[in-house]
Amino acid sequence: MEKELNLCVLATSLHEPGMDWLGLRRIRTRTGYLSARNGKPEVGHHEWSDGLMVEVRAKGHIGYCATNGLSEVEVRDAMRRALRVARAAAPHAIFRFDDTVRPAVRGVYRSARREDFGSGFHGGHVDLLVSLTEDLRASDRVVKAAATFVLRDLTIEYASSSGADFRQEMLVAGCDLRAIAQADGKVQQRTHHGYLTHLFQSGPDLFHAESLRREARRIGAEALELLAAEDCPTDTRDVVLAPDQMILQIHESIGHPLELDRILGDERNYAGSSFVRLEDIGSLQYGSPLLNVSFDPSVETEVASYGFDDLGNPASKQAIIRNGMLVRALGSLESQARAGVPGVANARVCAWNRPPIDRMANLNLEPGSSSFDAIIGSIERGVFMATNRSWSIDDFRNKFQFGCEYGRLIENGRLARLVRNPNYRGISVPFWRSLKAVGDTSTFQVLGVSNCGKGEPNQAVWVGHASPVCAFSNVEVFGGAS
Amino acid sequence: MMEQTARDLRAAFDSLADSLFHSLRPGEDLSLTLSAERSHFLRFSQGRVRQNGFVDDGTVEARLVTAGRSLTFDFPLSGAPGRDRAVAAAELERVRTFAPAWREDPFLVPIEARPSSEVFHGGTLPDPEALPGLLAHACGSLDLVGYFSSGLVVRAAANSKGMRHWFGVENFVVDCSAVLPSGQAAKASYAGRIWSNEDFERQVETLRTQSEALRRPRRTLKPGHYRVFLAPAALAELVGLMDSAAGEGALRQGESPLVALRDGRRSLSDGFSLSEDFSLGLAPRFNDFGEIFPENMPVIHSGRLANTLISARSAREYGIESNGAGSGESLRSVHVAPGHLAPDSVLQALGTGLYLANLHYCNWSDVPGGRITGMTRHACFWVENGELVAPISDMRFDDSIYSFFGSNLEAVTASGEIVPETSTYEWRSLGGMSLPGMLVRDFALTL
């Protein structure tokens, strides 16, 4: 039987000439994924992943070797290989890093609702999953009624030759419901606030039968209603966005443009750059004075809460946009060192086999003071849109287009008839400057985005977004294809 | 050395498979698929190294069929036999414990004896320690950003009825952009199995030359309808979005833009033909059920839906014949047929309009209508009377496949190129597309 790795001992005992620093990050994940469709089981899947990222700094450059070989011999070999490529790259590296980008922190973070994964899903979950598809299938015109449950137990251990020693343990639970209705050549979809947005640091209690079944019946019924609805009009009008669309608006046109590694140019070949320049931090009026956005790793159930980022930087809430003014970028210690500006603790990896890069974690739009009724009441001609179904933005994060599942016209301060295929497009900063009302805490919702992708090699992480209902003036809206 | 690594990985997989199959109980069947790599990555920006390192990875996805139930489970394959067997056995036991709680699957795909296959493509790969210096030398003052990836990629399959598949390839991909201070960029990929420093340096020089054309003052366009030429890399973004469009399940469940094509309500141009073509040698032919897909199968032929992708599960669900599609029913080795437009006549044929080298962030804006939105990106030019005039400021488009692959498809180039798959989500992907360029007489730019 192999000896269990002791990262602290290894990090402080392994050494090679020429190595200035060694870091070891082990990530273990156990995932359960169940889905059912139209009353039948579809996917019953479990995963176990366990691997180690070895980082070595030599002459200011950090090389890496990720391996799922977990003996001391294999770790030593990984260290040597990481050292060789670190030394080869150092004379040609983009920046010379030192100890400050890998602080020697010690501590433990556990997600608030963490409990042992234990046996994970059980028969009651399976019964509920299948029942939900039956609740979603409000009629035969619902051609796809699907439900998904996800549970992930994640443990991160980190140690370094400079004395870092921390551990993070999270349990994440997620749920997705969707109904696709089809009739007379028309197809409409309705979901549980978008694809797997119900993703939280929670436990199996997320799968609460009564509330989920109620949701499923609503979703199925609305998919059918949308078949009969008229198309969203094509014109310019005020737009009110529900939180389950705001999360994509925030994600694409605030989160990504403010990632400091994008501003520094690292993503220009793949995910793109940013319209934001370093000199804009502290001076760019990003949005209306109603816009307040924060990086917040401390929200108890939000999916990307943590105690430390994956470089070991202790994480805390920071204002990113205050009263519309850009005050801070989303940059980790490495990007802060390169750019010479402050940032946040946002270096993250998707798994053991990727190096850390700047990511969103939890990025939230703070609630304001307007009730939902007051917001609707203030609008003469507009459209209320809910639940993202399509998103696209340019590689500088300027020109965006979003589509939603569900719309209601707003006429003379009241919600009016249902419309389908509500879409809108705009340009980031002018759009955020047109923010005219921000909902209060009664409209605030915490959700997640499960598939945020960037990096080379590519990485997909989940991020948390929370937002109230928000209203914007004079937005270009349009409906579906004729 | 990689060939020895491939042999070691194969031995580890075969040994693990034998051990697991031997441990099965009466009434159980098991299939395994392996995705493994021994890869080197080097990420660069401004012609300098940002991050570099190695990834040694292997994941087995197992499918247990027992008592009318089908359950899948993933676990690591590290190559250490004792460790791998212990982990696999523990995961199998865990799934056995859960199985009674799962439901019987009326569309269960049984695990069956099937033909086996073995393919290995060796290569000559770049030296990871020499790459930083080579990059610096090739770039000079050029702002080159992107990444190298190279190494061994393996896909394998085995089942308890005796089927074995093995596909291994040593390859590399360089995907990069040459960026000007204005932010404009020219992009290229260099991929293959036989690395040449000289070829790489030539690619960088070509990019340098292409990026020079971007120094001209930019033209800002108004929204409207334009003649455009979609270069193969731009076409790849549009065709890539269609990867599961021909899936039988997607068509039946309202998730495909091709429903209207199938129903006869909409049509595509008779100049548009798309097939699954494994003679390209880019991806293994076996799917996750271990079935071998035909070497070539038309999906859309002269604008008509010729075949959908039907997995063994969909076949059972809908009472039709499977054609060897995997469980995801998505395209894996796409070939879009060339036409008759001579490549060196493209600009003349375009006349006045837009040359679109790349597109970005494409997404369906209306699936039933076949409408896609996205952005122009990198080296896109305004063309007048067959001459490149000016690069353009990025524009958003929103248009339907029934238009640009349909009534407004004017011509298709007589030859194409391979656009390699460059995705590295979870692991280095295999595959790619063989694509021509397309001249479209009316393409809607919206912002």
Image (tube, rainbow, N blue to C red):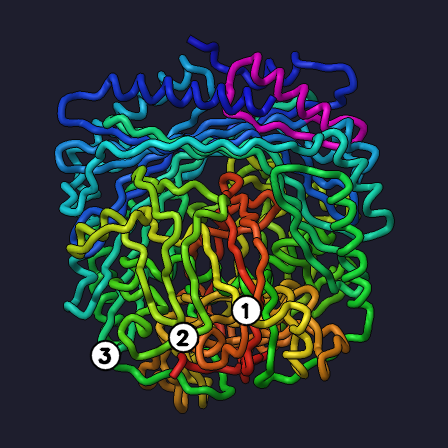
Q: Which residues are magenta?
A: A56-85
Tag 2 and tag 1 share a subunit: yes
Q: Nearer the viewer, mark 2 or mark 1?
A: 2
Q: Does the rendering let one see residue B93?
A: yes
Look at the numbered discs 2 and 1 and tell me whether their residues touch, using CB distance below 8 Å: no
Name the residue located 54 percent from the left edge and 15 percent from the top edge. Answer: A6
Task: Say which mark, if any, is on residue B111.
Answer: none
**Residue on which disc 2 sits:** B268
Amino acid type for the residue under numbered disc 1: Gly
Quarter of the image with the N terminus of chain A in it: top left
Q: Residues within 10 Å of mark 3 (few under 14, many from 20)?
A: few
Question: SS class of the residue under badge 3?
Answer: loop
Q: Residues within 10 Å of mark 2 (few under 14, many from 20)?
A: many
Q: How far from the left and from the top, in percent, is residue B174? A: 66, 45
First in sequence: mark 2 or mark 1? 2
Q: Say which mark, if any, is on residue A184.
A: 3
Lateral position of residue B340 relative to residue A99, left or right:
left
The CA distance from mark 3 to mark 2 is: 21 Å
Which residue matches tag 1?
B374
Query: Which residue is at 33% across, 73% downward?
Result: B261
Q: Amino acid at mark 3?
A: Asp
What amino acid is at disc 2?
Leu
Q: Residue A364 in the image: state x and y as whole percent.
A: 53, 58
- Residue B149 in the magenta stretch? The answer is no
Tag 1 secondary structure: strand
